Image (cartoon, grey):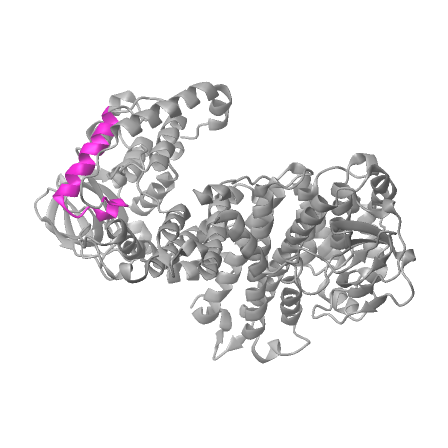
Amino acid sequence: MTINTQSIKANQVPELKEFRAEVAAWLAHNRPADPGFLLPQTFMEVGSEQVLDFLREWQHKVWSSGYLGMAWPEKYGGRGMEPAYQSIADQEMKRLRVPICFNVIGLGWAGPLIMDIGSDYEKDKYLKGILNAEDIWCQGFSEPNHGSDLGSIQTRAQRDGDDYVVNGSKIWTTMGNYAKYMILLARTDVQVERRYNGLSFFLAPMHAEGVTTTPIKKLTGEYGFTETFFTEARIPATSLMGEEGQGWHIAMKTLQYERGAEAGAAGGISILSIVMNDLLKMAQDVEREGKPLLKDPVTRDNLVKFLIEEKALYLAEKRIGIPALCADYPNSLPLSGKLRGTEFFRRMRQYALTLQGAQSSLYVGDDDTLDGGFWQRAYLNNFSTTIGGGTSQVQANIIGEHVLGLPKD
Amino acid sequence: MTSTRTANMALSFSDEQAMILESAKSFCSDRSNISSVRSLLTSENGYSADVWSEMVALGWTGIAMPEQYGGSELGIGATIPLVESMGRHLLSTPYISTTIASQALQRGGSEEQKAKWLPQMVRGSVGALALLDNEDWGATKTSCTLSADFELQGSKLLVNDAAVADLFIVWADHNGAQVLVLVEAAALPNNALSKKVLIDETKRACNICFNGVKLSAEAILPNSEAALRDSRLIGALLTAAEATGSSAAALDVVVAYLTSRIQFGRLIGSYQSLKHPTVEMLIGMDSARTLIYHAATVIDDHTLNQDAEIACRMAKAQATDALLFAGDRGIQFHGGMGFTYECDAQLYLRRALWIQHQYGDAQHHRLHLANLLLN
């Protein structure tokens, strides 16, 4: 999957430039009209059929117009092009802030995984449905009471003839109630000494008998996740990916595709990013003592602190690529990325609400909210990132122990 | 809108910089272990003349200088890995003062001024900038005057490495114009220098009284305005690099203690109340390092553009705050030991308290950044 984009950029600059203009024009012309409800900022906010239908239609349109899965082979619904084209399409979607391509687990996790190590049967069966948004995918790694410690997975899958019988439950299943398939991590062997070796990876059907989902109401008051229960659920043995015992290894592999089309992901934006520009614009619009907040010295100092932090955050991605500048603690930036990023966004969004004054005491659904309550919801939802995938406190432990070599608790 | 002004995301590192970093690391760690740092604390000039000569012989004083003046013309960005390494090992020499002074001269001087002084500075003559009337780095005017017949009147505060400087570049008011003037150390009257007691004992500075120093028109840098502005920004960047190195060293000292000191039956590094702030030190240092090398990438020999100004100011604001945090927590985490002079943690806190006011503290730079980014 490694493709030298440098050479493409060097040789095809005019074509890429032309393509960028083409995508931008298409997006500008085809971006959906304001649906009259607050659009999800991430794929974890698909809480109603209304939102689902809207996003499904949008993703289908992006794909059928040729701007999704561009680097995937034609026979699986792609266009067989260089990933650089998809990267450009993604950049333009991000820049023009069109709605997200919501089938994120399919596009960015399951799809590239199947492309990478899947059988022909699996490729034929799953890939196109991921791109055209017919088949929604969800992820079943985390379990109740175990947080993000995957080594303690309790959900059992036992071979029985042509099936596996699955028992257990998963939590924080994004779009679990709408998904057709789940990438499922379950324990097939309880005897093994190293607990990670007993795990297996499944491309599991969600519409099998014995699989039920219960939506979880988030602190925002909205839905987006489910708890998923397996009660003597029978899934076909063909849904096992690789071999029994390879689950941990395969699960770790799914994480590497997050870095976009160059790493194998189908493309599309998974998140509508909120950046400092948005906060600055708000500070320009909101007035205190008859003047825009942007003229208040205390506010200005705080905003500059955020701007410095934002700049260091984005530049860190570049420094990771320069080993000489990371020699003392080589794993520092990669391992601290989640902590730095998610905590920055949490504080920045919280500050946005502080700046809004009494207006931020209103909530989504009130006509007088600023931007429909966008910031309120963004701040509350951001906790999914400072908690999910290992809380910030767990991240700090990991960095302290694995980067600085501090002793474990 | 506004933050498109922060959009310059250039960060690169040349082979030359990588080589400089490698040799600087081993040189600084070899020549400046902690016992030699301590042995210099009470010395007259605060540095080893032998080490300084070696640095000159290695060509480091010429890294950023044009080839025509005996330098290797790699640009000021190439000095950043060197200065960071010096900060990491608390290696004090007149390198930083001289580099900033030579930048002022290179950017603002006449051909004659440069031809006379730059080769000497490449060969180890010490230069020092004399800018401050008081503690305010934001001053736009100076009370030090250069009269119509070129006589100086006024004093400058906290001139680094003044006692060993061969050449001063002094900010003065000349008939209402803000100028930089060259003053040779030999031209100073007796008792012009008064040594100051600094909180960072690895550093040396004097106040200087320039009253009665007679100069000529040729002492004025023709392009003083740009040189004054740019040398202050370059000073901020170089001290940011030094502070970043010192942050990494402060972190090393804390980590060494946290992984060896046992209290209540456990290594204290296992306590999250110490572990997590230590991670915060790492992250602060990492951000500072990212920003200094970004600044090193966007800065060049031309008049500093807005991207370079933003980068230098961000680097200084971040590096200063990061080191202050690391220095302060470094003392606290050493417990009773941290309250002693013997404990090395004090060296970094004192460095932090000193360096935050070199070429403007964090708040000064954020104020200027606000004007650049938010207006």
Q: Is residue B87 left or right of residue A401?
A: right
Please name whichever residue, A91 or A387, is drawn nearer the observer in this view of the structure.
A91
Please name whichever residue, A117 or B297, is drawn nearer the observer in this view of the structure.
B297
Vertical order, A231 against A357 (above or below): above
Magenta-colored span = A39-64
Question: Is residue A325 visible to the viewer in this orientation of the structure?
Answer: no
Vertical order, B139 against A36 (above or below): below
Image location of residue B330, percent across then percent down: 57, 69
Question: Is residue A83 visible to the viewer in this orientation of the structure?
Answer: yes
* Residue under the point 16% across and 41% down: A52
As for residue A365 lying within the magenta part, the answer is no
Quadrant position of residue B51: bottom right
Q: Main secondary structure of the magenta part?
A: helix
* Residue under the point 50% across and 69% down: B269
* Residue under the point 73% across and 62% down: B133
As for residue A56 lying within the magenta part, the answer is yes
Q: Is residue A69 left or right of residue B112?
A: left
Image location of residue A264, percent across then percent down: 36, 33
Image location of residue B125, percent across then percent down: 85, 51
Image location of residue B106, percent across then percent down: 77, 42
Q: Quadrant of the N terminus of chain B?
A: top left
Quadrant position of residue A254: top left
Q: Is residue A365 left or right of residue A306?
A: left
